[in-house]
Amino acid sequence: MKLSRVGARLLAAATTLVPVVVLACDGCFGPIEEHVSKHVRVVKRMQPGALDASYGPTRPLQWGQLNVLHTSDTHGWLSGHIKEANYGADWGDYVSFVASMKRTAEDLKVDLLLVDSGDLHDGTGLSDSTTPNGEISNEIFVQQTGYDLLTLGNHELYASEVAYQTFNNFSRAWGDKYLTSNVEIMNPDTQEWEHIGKTHKYFTTKHGLRIMAFGVLFDFTANTNASRITKAADMIKQDWFQQAVHHPKPIDVFLVLGHNSARPGRQASTLKTVYSAIREAHPDTPIQIFGGHSHMRDFVVYDQSSTASESGRYCESLGWFSMSGFNSSNSGFTGPLNPKGVPNPNRTAVVANPVNPTPIDKRSNQKTSPFLYSRRYLDWNRLTFDYHAPGSQFLHNDILSRPNFISSPSSSSNSSSQLKQLGAQISSSITSYRHQLGLGKVYGCTPQTFWVTGAPFMAPNSMYTFLADAMAHQILNPKRAKVPRVHISNTGMARFDLHKGPFTMDDSYITSPFPSLVVYIPEVPWEMARGVLERMNKKGAGQGRRVEYNTTSVGDPKGKREFGVWQGEECVNPPIEQFGAMGKRKVLGKREEIMGVPVGNGGGGRQEVLEVGYTTEDDFGVDGDDTIHARIANYAIPAYFGTTAGFPEWKKGGRKGRRQEPRVVDLVFNDFINDDLLAALGGNYTADDIKFYMEPSNYTLRDFLVPYVEQNWQAGMPMCEISRRRPHVG
């Protein structure tokens, strides 16, 4: 891809800036050597200060005739999770891993595809601190040149500038690999609607599989008005789709990418609609779906020749899928029936002991299919990558002694310096970008980890306890300091947990990446305002539209212009704890026994304490997670939270503990929830009553965290301790 001027300038600066960043971050995060796994000799890469996993997988992957590595919902996390050991690898580590896996596929004479299901924006400073959003993170993303198919997500469509960035740069960089079957944009040059990418792609793999691919977004309605989404039910009736499904050339397998939940019925998924349209025309042809959007690990059986995979979020997970069963009578595949020297797929597409099976579950048991499947969810760390692609990450003395992979003539080339150097250059450029953007600047020490769903709502270690206190202290207009105020926000403003350790500029974006404006309705009668939060939570989260206003009046229609949408259906951060079926299923046995791992055994013959992480149950059971973990605690949170500030002092005399109630309050909130708050407030209030609360008027939810930290979290500076602990249950 041709780099933008910003990307080219930053990349050119990488070699001179890396040493500076390393020295600075060693001081912030402590000596790097403290966090290196002791059971393996490594050459440290990742990002400076990032933690390494303490243990990893113990089972090799099953290689089939068609194999797929799947990413989704990366949301700018290309630096990796610097404070989380399970997910400490960066994009460069991943690139080295994929290059090695592609080479292994060549050795085995099978096909390996790399696919992505969209949502690249809104999540970290790397993606969100530039104008436009994603200018640098997109440049990094495309350095993974191995992608075969990609599609876009709803976060590429919230703001017009991002949608046009996707259309003008990102889509064109990928050419016919970028599929946007039901998403169009108004071309400013032609003044006509056209698809951002291609509607579909027909291609033949290196080993002869003839594939028809689509990329389908769910029926998203909160997009910028520079774009338009065709509902899936209407898309399947369009001429181009019917012509693609009834293609004159043979089709061995359909691949459907979707920023769309893999499981029918979850988050308004429309993939079943597309599946049904294809199945009507092709009763027996395999249909493999790769979903996204729900931020979950999941695997769903549609029928015995059709399954759907979903691979998590935020560069925490990398999905692995494989299938076999192609032969000369049902395909053009020219490779082996089963690749030699490696485990092969051995599962038919039948739901493991379904309880109250769906119509799809029932259908899956009514016919015979030659196809066998496997799926796996890989933790995003270098220990995982090196286990499955030895030598792609580390320098080992014991690579050949590990019983985890194949011994082939190219095993030495798989561990060659060229593969490691490929990713190392990208890792260095990420370090340089972070330095240029100031993302490593430390403002204070986070005293403990604050959890979005990993702690009880409003407990001392709840994210919302921290945010409520920060809002009460920092969001105050001095000119209105005498007026008591009620602060209300959607819980979706908190995108991710805030981990103990240095609070950096990057943390401010990770915690709250959305630039929602702080607004208010002045002097609302307390009797009306006091019940607003409760009424909003009873109704639940809506889908708000963020608009940009002039400085005259927030409610003035003449001052509005469309600016996009923020958060939408993802108002509540999806929990990491996974129950793919979203219901009770019979557990086939202890997870550790099914996965062949004794409790506490982290591999390598040493006993380890299990770290908390993903514990997934999907249609194939409980053995999908590549690395075994203890379960993460998961608590329900409401759609909205709030606090009060500036209320009168306690009454003297009278009933003990009773606070003096004000006559009126300023109702302070963010503009994403305008409609929901007005509906709950009632009375005669309209959008015309909403004003900017802070000065300057463009003050957003991104602006209050850093000042709060600078004023309140200086204990422990300049050295801050990082905690590796996460809340767990059972």
Image (cartoon, rainbow, N blue to C red):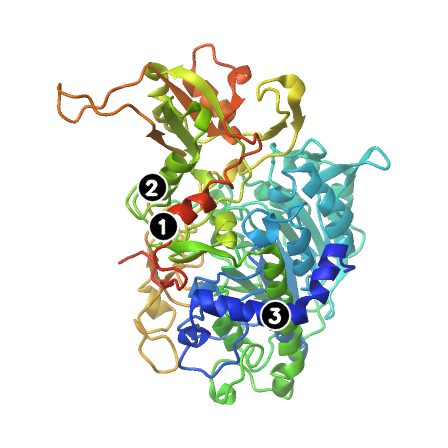
Mark 2 or 3: the one toward you: 3
> Where's residue 336, x and y in %?
65, 76
**Residue 313 can be seen, yes or no:** no
Residue at image coords 65%, 50% = 134
Amino acid type assigned to the residue bearing label 2 in the image = Thr
Amino acid type assigned to the residue bearing label 1 in the image = Phe
Residue 465 - label: 2
Residue at image coords 34%, 29% = 644
**Residue 704 can be seen, yes or no:** yes
Tell me which numbered mark, 2 or 3, is placed earlier along the sequence: 3
Q: Which residue is mark 1?
A: 450
Tell me the distance, in whole angstroms, between the alpha carbons under discs 3 and 1.
31 Å
Q: Residues within 10 Å of mark 1 (few under 14, many from 20)?
A: many
Residue 699 - label: none
* 670 lies above or below 306: above
Q: Are marks 1 and 2 in contact (CB under 8 Å)?
A: yes
Q: Residue furthest right?
A: 190
Residue at image coords 49%, 61% = 81
Amino acid type assigned to the residue bearing label 3 in the image = Val
The one nearer the camera, 232 or 284, is 232
Q: Residues within 10 Å of mark 2 (few under 14, many from 20)?
A: some
